[in-house]
Image (cartoon, grey):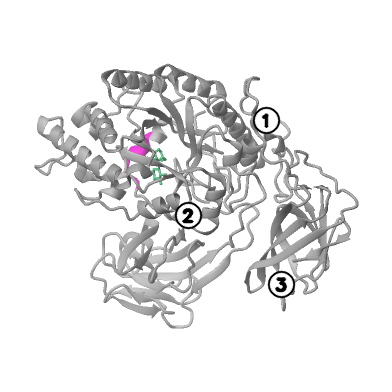
Amino acid sequence: MRALPRLAIAALLVAIPAAAVTVTVAAHAADDPTPITVLTSDFEDGTVQGWAGRSAETLAHSTAQAHGGTGSLLVSGRTAAWQGPSLDVLNTFEKGTAYTISVWVRMASGSDNARLSVERRTGGVAAYDQVVGNTAVTSGSWVNLTGRYTLASDVEFLRVYVETSSTTGSFHIDDVTASYVPALPIQTGIPSVKDVVTEFPVGAAITGAEIVTEHGQLLNKHFDSVTPGNALKWDATEPSENTFTYAQADPLMAYAKANNLAVRGHTLVWHNQTPAWVFTGADGQPMTATAEDKELLLARLENHIRNVAAHYGTDIGVWDVVNEVIDESQSDGNRRSNWYNVTGLDYIRTAFRVAREVAPHAKLCINDYNTNVAAKRDFLFNLVSTLKAEGVPIDCVGHQMHINVNWPTIAETESMLTKFIPLNIDQQITEMDVSIYTSNSENFTTPPADRLLKQAYVYRDMFALFRKYPGEITSVTLWGLADDNTWLDTFPVTRKDAPLLFDTRLQAKQAYWGVVDPSKIETSPSPSSPSASVSTSVSPSASVSTSVSPSTSVSPSTSVSPSASVSPSTGTSSCAVTYRVTGSWPGGFQGEVKIGNTGTNALTGWNLNWSFTGGQKITQLWGGTPAQTGTAVTVTNASWNGNVPAGGSTTFGFLGSWTGTNPVPTAFTLNGTACAIL
Ligand code: 9MR
């Protein structure tokens, strides 16, 4: 079974609007704590509860309809579809926090499509982020719009609003909420992917909000390189002819530069996310294969590349010059895109020629998906051979690698790599993710443990394979940072997927260990997901040839023990504990505990005890296993952080509940010995 059946991939031909900072499905990990609600509008008190129109429309409390209780908010007197109720959330939403926003909508009469958005302004310039796209609403029933939103920049104006797509009919809204799940700190005590995989840079595709707070920390810790996921595409950079804007990409580029991350530029030419004006002729009609249209289209292409590639100069070391030009269902293998239909293969020739001229320093790639499929691979190979023989400056082939836990095999993937070796060009893995789904009809609310385990084996085996070809493969990029933001949540159908190395709360998955240290893939349920069950019949999806030995060159850190059952050593003499409350809200808090080994012997396992005298209770803990009886708390090391060398330290974090007061513990013992408190 394929990860992306051809038909489903074909859906990519339909332009999907870029929503750089939002996804529209709930993305909670199995062990998420209860979300914290920061905003509720139930319209049960007879007022409009602070909501206002976006213009001169009328907002009023209404009892004509109610989703819950007896009241709702009615907006009437609209003279444009964009008019609708809006609420100021400037002092409610914090930058970098992912909020889930929910609103119920019902037309007063008739029908339309409603959508939920956020307007933000910085320095007086407005931007509009769609949280939930057009959703059919009628006067016959309430419809829920729920989506996630993360503010990525500093703003002086921030309002949530509801509008419709075409009519100016009156509508009701009710039971609006916004909530978030407190972010977990990233795990700082685990090896960095980039320090373990040293044969080539390892990167992640990112969108706007992934450079702030914990996401930014995760990116910096594990990756050498980034690919802006949407920000450099044509619709983002040249939305109308010869008007170039880098508002989406500039913050990502500045972040990459400041943090020493290499950048893969994606992408200069694609059939998707390209505005309609590009393919509209001087006569206002869709272009066809005439000499005039061809000349105009190639001139537009040249102008686009000259501007975009020049804007970033040497800051972009690799460009996906053309993307997805092969279609193996065509007898000649060439995708019948507007580009091809108007120019034949000349758009590819022009794109590479101009890119080389403007960015002579950059590696220039031809990038595609399903390049492991023999027919597609061979068409791509033939095209690159032909163009290179003509002198077209192609330096590299990009294999996207959107795969799944069952497909493809390692052997197929290896054939993909070896096929291109005779061309003597670089190969890059450009968009790797491993879906947990093997068909479009599957839908898991929580990723099953056996799928996550299979996924870990796939990551293990694929990375082992890539590392066998360090001379050919010059970078590996994952299409996303963590499972809280992946395009697979809405493709090929809307459902929660979990295709990356870190979970929705940025914690390392089995997949991470598959890459970093396969000996630590846990084949039994981990302490943090007690409900998970792993079938003993699960076997690695593919086996790596015996000449691949990931462990010989992998040395994550000498302080990490491969053993999953470390028993505490006796006689620990010296320790120092730092206990910090890193966040607190009514009834809940988040804490972090650092254990320093100030003795002269390495710890080979540990348990730390303290007393929660205020009656606080640990509700979730990462980086260890908690046990609490009344006020007495014991935390035992996780499988991967039991070994702490002399002079070293390890850190774990937790969420807790409290009532009344939340006093800081005043004494800690490590393996039975009292510790200093820092
Ligand atoms: O990750 C991108 C997603 O946000 C867009 O909605 C989507 C559709 O245009 O494009 C995604 O990125 C694609 C990449 O540019 C090319 N290969 C396939 C990727 C996944 O669709």
Q: Quadrant of ligand 1?
A: top left
Secondary structure at numbered mark 3: loop
Q: How many marks?
A: 3
Secondary structure at numbered mark 2: helix
Residue at image coords 81%, 42%? 565
Q: Locate residue 281: give its quadrant.
A: top left
Classify the position of the C terminus by image quarter. Answer: bottom right
Residue 371, x across and y down, in percent: 43, 26
Stretch in magenta: 10-16
Residue 277, x across and y down, in percent: 19, 45
Residue at image coords 47%, 41%? 479
Q: Callout 2: few (<14), some (14-19), or many (20+) C-alpha neighbours within 10 Å?
A: many
Q: Callout 3: few (<14), some (14-19), or many (20+) C-alpha neighbours within 10 Å?
A: some
Q: Name the residue tied to disc 1.
A: 551
Tag 2: amino acid: Ile
Q: CA distance from mark 2 to mark 1?
A: 32 Å
**673 within the magenta span:** no
Q: Name the residue tied to disc 2.
A: 211
Q: CA distance from mark 3 to mark 2?
A: 32 Å
Residue 147 visible here = no
Q: Name the residue tied to disc 3.
A: 658
Give the mark, 3 or 2, whose residue is nearer the N terminus.
2
Residue 408 visible here = yes
